[in-house]
Amino acid sequence: MSERGIQWFRFTAPANFYDLAGRLIPWFAALTIALFAVGLYLGLVVAPSDYQQGDSYRIIYIHVPTAWMGMFLYVLMAAYAAIGLIWRIKMADVMAKAIAPTGALFTFLALWTGALWGRPTWGVYWVWDARLTSMLILLFLYLGYMALHAAIDDRQRASNASAVLAMVGVVNVPIIYFSVQWWNTLHQGASITVTEAPTMATIMFVTLLIMVLAAWMYSVAVVLARARVELLERERNARWVQERLEGGTK
Amino acid sequence: MFHPLLALLRRDLTLALRRPQDALTVVGFFVVVVALFPLGIGPDPEFLRSLAPGVLWVAALLAVMLSLERLFSDDFRDGTLEQLLLVPEPMGLLVLTKIVAHWLITGLPLVLVSPLLAIQLNLRPDEIAILMLALLIGTPILSLIGAIGAALTLGLRGGGVLIALLILPLYAPPLILGAGAVDAVMHGSSAQAHLSLLGAMMVFALFATPWATAAAVRIMLD
Amino acid sequence: MFHPLLALLRRDLTLALRRPQDALTVVGFFVVVVALFPLGIGPDPEFLRSLAPGVLWVAALLAVMLSLERLFSDDFRDGTLEQLLLVPEPMGLLVLTKIVAHWLITGLPLVLVSPLLAIQLNLRPDEIAILMLALLIGTPILSLIGAIGAALTLGLRGGGVLIALLILPLYAPPLILGAGAVDAVMHGSSAQAHLSLLGAMMVFALFATPWATAAAVRIMLD
Amino acid sequence: MMEFLAMGGYAPYVWGSYLIMAGLLVVEMLQLRYRRRSLLAWIRRMARLRAQEEKQ
Amino acid sequence: MPAPHATNHPERKETVTAELSGMADREFRAVDLAAERGERLLFEHLEFKLSPGQLLQVSGRNGCGKTSLLRILSGLSRPTAGEVYWGDEPIRSVDGGTGSCLGYLGHQNALKEDMSAEENILIAGRLGGGRPERETVLAMLGGLGLAGYEDLPVRFLSQGQKRRVALARLLLQPRALLILDEPYAALDVQVIEVLRGAIEAHLTRKGMIIITTHQAVDIDGDCRNLHLG
Amino acid sequence: MPAPHATNHPERKETVTAELSGMADREFRAVDLAAERGERLLFEHLEFKLSPGQLLQVSGRNGCGKTSLLRILSGLSRPTAGEVYWGDEPIRSVDGGTGSCLGYLGHQNALKEDMSAEENILIAGRLGGGRPERETVLAMLGGLGLAGYEDLPVRFLSQGQKRRVALARLLLQPRALLILDEPYAALDVQVIEVLRGAIEAHLTRKGMIIITTHQAVDIDGDCRNLHLG
Ligand code: HEM
Ligand SMILES: Nc1ncnc2c1ncn2[C@@H]1O[C@H](COP(=O)(O)OP(=O)(O)OP(=O)(O)O)[C@@H](O)[C@H]1O
Ligand SMILES: Nc1ncnc2c1ncn2[C@@H]1O[C@H](COP(=O)(O)OP(=O)(O)OP(=O)(O)O)[C@@H](O)[C@H]1O
Ligand SMILES: [Mg+2]
Ligand SMILES: [Mg+2]
């Protein structure tokens, strides 16, 4: 058990991760910029207006990516948290903590863009239907996770405690998902599925895909960058940090 | 009476009986919150009636949540929780015992007074029956889930409010199902589906949450 | 910065800034409670709109009430409250200072986020303005009255819920007036009368309650 | 151009979404950079202090 | 319940250093005190007089009422009977409050866990109406062996370290009378020495001290003993 | 951080009285322990072995990590590195839990304030899996000078009386290893004597004891010292 632990530790050694992430971040940043540039151009300029919704539908190009990222990042965060808790891998804790703010941000943006889209289409900014409410709950789950982390001084204890919370919260995700069935909803059902052909125009579909990819790349870059800061903070007395600072690296 | 778990259950119940005001204040809170609504909203009976399931459930949920802060905090503060970790029984079972005691002290009385409040909000007898049934299945879920939050906020300043933030989102499903059950009866359909889902949820919570809570306690006392 | 009262105010604000999550969780609680209602009651926008003033006020009141538990309890637990009794300043002023700090930390943020929630419950801009004004006058009253309850429950187990029971009845007048002010605008009449009564109540509370609170603190520490 | 900015009459909604999103992402990145810089400054300071102590 | 024995010293010393508060030349008297906790009478007809420069050690078994007595003397609780006087005024009606003439350190340390030792002491000083200097505070903390811990939040300190901070705060407030309830508990040997020095200095400045402890203390000065129970 | 010094005693004693729990003939070992609190390394490479009948006194300045060490030894916290063994098993995975082989008394007394001393002890006994007798409990409380206080709610007891109740509870649980964090704090002289007697009796029954204290203890028996910091 303990021997395996040591191997794992080497594999995820903070210094290695720190260097690797440092090398990867520029690439992801570049990809993010490129994809956003193309996606925004296609979405705002090239793609035609919708015959029903006019230009307001263009919100979809940021609404859907942010909504997906918000949900996906939560699951990812919980997975890392679980790994950190069960196998006591510090790097996983760092990743989980680094994901939370970005996930919360995307969730908030999904709510915001959705609300701004709701006004022209539904006539109100907000309705309490299943999809919207569940997204709001997701935001609360993120906030709870971050609040708990911040409330505990001891790093290890904070990681472990909020990991428990994240894992419990994950149970809520499928429940949230199925609540659509108990509750009549105004919100659009899934129109992009893996199994069926997309029901929307190709240009829209491609643009959406590009924007989703862009959001992905952005998340990766920011999360890695935050994880590096987090690592520095935790290990500020470690030899490897001192070495890297003396070497003048960033 | 000599089995460790029974001793723990008895201890918690005795302590609660020594200060009955604790349990009574939870009930009091429930009653007062429900009573506040007509003050804020206005007295129209039909209107109040249509609100009743939601208001009663939200009030019950808040009352349970508030009382949860003390599930472990007393034991934590005086060091008995630390000693419980040293008891040669699985921590999950000890935690479950404490939750059961807690529900007997706070959850059950809520179920028992709910009909009085329901009458004040103009619910009919059949609706009241479903309300009580839903609360009877639902309040243990609230205690079980809430225990995790209570454990996670042990020893933190501002624990009370932090618990709220941590677990209220998790309370959404039982709330929707519980209030939905009564609503269904009010609109003439059956509450069957809601109640069975609620039941399933309770069984699941019964088996899963004590272990998560025990883990949380260990972490917070580390 | 050298006057004792200023030192106390600054101390309390610094402590709050050191753990901003405490203040944030109060706001979080407010938001979550408001969000629970639609879950329990159902999503109909017109219905929610007519409930909005009551729900927002009840939620604000519960949030203030919960946060009150910590007004003195931290100082009590670590013994600083005892030392405050030995400070050569009138205890009433010390208490008032603590209440002011507490309102700045918890009451004011509630006023500031209320518009967001009001939008979710479909209130119109003019109604929102009155809501904020009413909360701005009303939340200090809640803090001032609540402080008495907080002092009376010092060191008692189950303080949180007991506070609730003691002071919620006292909260009825500000609740009726505050929610009434918004209701009035919703029904096209003026909120003037409600607001001036609320203002009078605040002035009265400002002068009377700190002394009662100080007396309560002395008694509980005897 | 004006037509583009008007977004068929939906300007507040569309631009309200895109700009907030852009703004918040930028804020996130700036905040991260700020945090990193102040942390590095702090670590350097502590290292210098320690070096001084060792010399004495 | 045997009546407690206390000796007293009639003549008043007039020289007081400027550091102590203006009322430092008054006597501190307990007249016919009685206290009960629950149904139990802890002591009655307790009398003593403390003059500037004197120390009173209250001793007795666990539970004989030492803490209860000290809280009464500092005006935090009311006695069942009798009165405590500061000069000729009852202690609870002294101008500027009890706190202007005495400092009290109970079982609890009264520290804000989220603030550093330094901040805790500075704020306590300001609350007491003084204008404490950073340097004095740091020097005092250093003297108590807390150099390097001054700006750590108190919550990170150990049991004994917290006690030291509380002592530093008390010693920095120039009060004529210091009331200390088991100040030595949890302290290691070095600090006990330092504390002894501070107590002796306070006595030479014509301060008064009332102290309980279960450990033997030998302090140079005008020491009296009050045995309870 | 200087490495702590500990001596150990290789040969194992086999005779154990029936009163101690079955595993009382095992050794208790700490292997290469390290602990950090916050950013600070408290100790590392700490090793010691304790055989039946031995006492280990952990000493050191305030804040050197005594409490932290004791919590690790009793399995309440995890060390940053290293492992604590009970016989050949890591203490955290002993059958029946850590609590089946050791008893721990920390800074806190772990008493329910609303229950009497007697109830507190009886319940703790049952929780520990035993069937404590009322008479034994009353006798122990009497021995610690609490006769007459047995059925008072603990909240009415003084600081020192509470500590005595906690000690009584610990001494009545037949655990092979007792871990005591400053048990003498707030106790008066008579009880200190009684406690010394109890400790010596535990050692003669081939129990083990780990203790911290700032007061001098002279205990007859096989005593070792572990100096931290
Ligand atoms: C605050 C309000 C809103 C929230 C929180 C919200 C939330 C979400 C979420 C979580 C998803 C992804 C779920 C999935 O793919 O199954 C999503 C997708 C989507 N939303 Fe929204 N939404 C909001 C408002 C709106 C509005 C007003 C519209 C348009 C009328 C809209 C149209 C869509 C569409 C078309 C999708 C893509 C569905 C798909 O293709 O799978 N949303 N929204
Ligand atoms: N939560 C914490 N975070 C950071 N540092 C801490 C924490 N708790 C304790 N410390 C530090 O760890 C060190 C050891 O504390 P510990 O309580 O083990 O000391 P101790 O030897 O028991 O002291 P005492 O004799 O005063 O009881 C202290 O220097 C303290 O400042
Ligand atoms: N609230 C209370 N109600 C009833 N009795 C009490 C209360 N508080 C304390 N007592 C009793 O009063 C007596 C005196 O308590 P006090 O704390 O003054 O003792 P003490 O001399 O300081 O003891 P120690 O040396 O243990 O600190 C004790 O016997 C205790 O049992
Ligand atoms: Mg005492
Ligand atoms: Mg210690």
Image (cartoon, coloured by chain):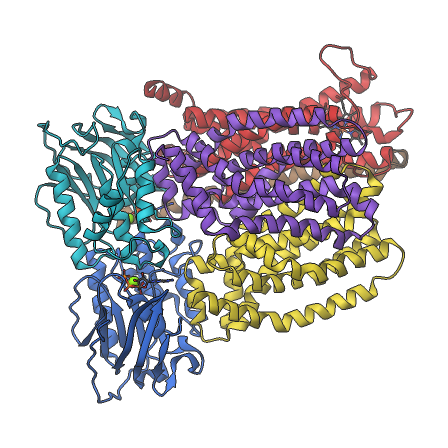
Chain colours: A red, B purple, C yellow, D brown, E blue, F cyan
| Rendering coords of residue F3 (x, y %) | 20, 38
A230 displayed left or right of E108: right
Place residue C200 in its image quadrant. Answer: bottom right
E111 displayed left or right of F131: right
Tell which of F45 and F31 is nearer to you: F31
Examine the rendered structure and indicate whether residue B21 appears above or below residue B13: below
Tell which of C21 and C205 is nearer to you: C205
| Rendering coords of residue F106 (x, y %) | 29, 46
| Rendering coords of residue B30 (x, y %) | 63, 48
Examine the rendered structure and indicate whether residue D52 appears above or below residue C140: above
Total tally of numbered discs in the picture? 0
Examine the rendered structure and indicate whether residue F1 appears above or below residue A215: below
At 58% from the left edge and 70% from the top edge, which residue is drawn? C210
Tell which of E111 and A248 is nearer to you: E111
**The C terminus of chain C: image quadrant:** bottom left
At 24% from the left edge and 31% from the top edge, which residue is drawn? F32
A47 displayed left or right of F183: right
